[in-house]
Image: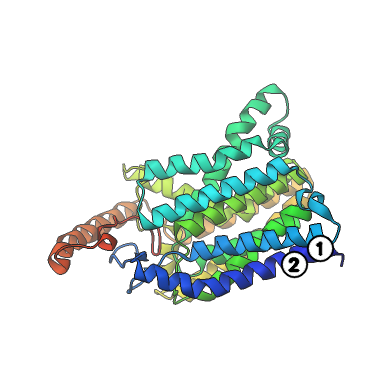
Amino acid sequence: MNIPDGSAILAGLTAFGVTYLLMPSITSYAKAKSWVDQPDGTRKTHTAATPRTGGVAIWFGILAGVLISVFLATGTGAGMGYFEMPFGMITALTILAGGSVAALVGFYDDTRPLGAPVKLLAQLVAATPLVASTEFIAAVTVLLGGGPIAGVLAYPAVIIWVVFVMNAINLVDGLDGLAGGLSVIAISFLVILGGLAGGPLILALALMGAVLAFLRFNLPPAKVFMGDTGSLLIGYLLAVLALVVVHAEPTTNQAMAVLVVLGIPGLDTAMSVVRRVALGRNPLQADNDHLHHRMLKRSFGIHARAVTIFYLIGCTLGLLALLIAFADAVAANIIVGVAGALALIVLWDLGYFDITTYAEVGKQEDMKVREVQRRAPAATGTRSRAFRKPVRRGVTSN
């Protein structure tokens, strides 16, 4: 193993260590500042106020892992050129800038809740710097068929993709250990799909190390949640790694493989829009009928069982993605069909094809929310900032 390869592994270990060491102090500080996720009796299943600042430790862990790897590569003669491969410094800086904005937006939302439209606008701002990356734009242009029109469409396509994945991870962050575990699985398969090396590998292993350390505190029963700081940051970096994979081989097979790897968050996001539109609601309005809500009921309320099932599905989709990437066009389409069939089976098993359940869940949620709102003033008198926070996230989020 040469030094550059070792620096990528060091990035993961450093990110793990820094995140692990920072988590207890950040959790204590969050409790002192009342930056906690309160039980609401509707979408959330936790019964005690839980800090939602785990994403802060994840961000510091990633930064530490990347920086120490850069110092190592530079000090041993590999130089910054290694960190940049296969991209230029502009792309590296745009990734850092967008990730910083994503983390800051999430942190602000965790401490002073933003409205959905403002939050969406902030996500667009976080994704915008990536259009300065000629490598990403060129890869998406090729994927869209090439030519001047594809070149123009590549710019909004990159932004939409990044915002979509950010929201997908945010939405799937609904059970203890779910978003973090699925992210680790996705990172593992993206590294293999893209044959990542250099800077992208450093980033991937730093992200994996930080999330693994976070999971130590987030597996059922969770002591801390990643919050929007973590979910938006992780979603942003997963979207970037997916673009790296497409850049490595801008083919339809590779693009389909990436979509399959991120199948669970993607499916949950798609169903959220369908469900809310079917109920005549704002697609941005949170509810309590995500995949994880139904899976938890299907698992008799046992969090660990529901999360394990999702992990197994995630690994299965990752293996199918590898087959898609290395298959010919006909075989790839067949495998995509298998992945689609698996998604339909999951939706059927969870009762999503019975549209009457949508209205029933919506009615139950509305009743519970009204009851919570009715009781809250009488129970708390003058409500603190923590209790003024609007109902906004799933079981632990959305």
Q: Quadrant of residue 279?
A: top left
Give the residue number, with chain letter if any, for mark 1. 5
**Residue nearer the viewer, 97 or 86:** 97
**Residue nearer the viewer, 72 or 15:** 72
**Which residue occupies the extreme top position in the image?**
148
Give percent across and percent down for residue 300.
40, 74
Image height of 159 relative to 241, above or below: above
**Residue nearer the viewer, 112 or 290:** 112
Amino acid type, label 2: Ile
- Asked if the residues shown at circle 1 and circle 2 are in contact, with their CB atoms under 8 angstroms apart, the answer is yes
Could you tell me how far apart the alpha carbons at marks 1 and 2 are, in whole angstroms?
A: 7 Å
Give percent across and percent down for residue 28.
42, 73
Image height of 176 relative to 247, above or below: below
Q: Quadrant of the C terminus?
A: bottom left
Give the residue number, with chain letter if any, for mark 2. 9
Q: Is residue 185 visible?
A: no
Element at badge 1? Answer: helix
Structural crowding at the residue carrying mark 2, measured as other residues with C-alpha within 10 Å and reported as few (<14), some (14–19) or many (≥20)? some
Q: Residue at x 58, y 57 (%)?
A: 342
Left or right of 356 on screen, residue 209: right
Q: Residue at x 48, y 63 (%)?
A: 226
Image height of 202 relative to 47, above or below: above
Q: Is residue 170 visible?
A: yes
Structural crowding at the residue carrying mark 1, measured as other residues with C-alpha within 10 Å and reported as few (<14), some (14–19) or many (≥20)? some
Give percent across and percent down for residue 37.
35, 65
Element at badge 2? Answer: helix
Left or right of 267 on screen, residue 132: right
Q: Residue at x 63, y 43 (%)?
A: 94
Give percent across and percent down for residue 258.
66, 50
Amino acid type, label 1: Asp
- Number of marks in picture: 2
Mark number, residue 90: none
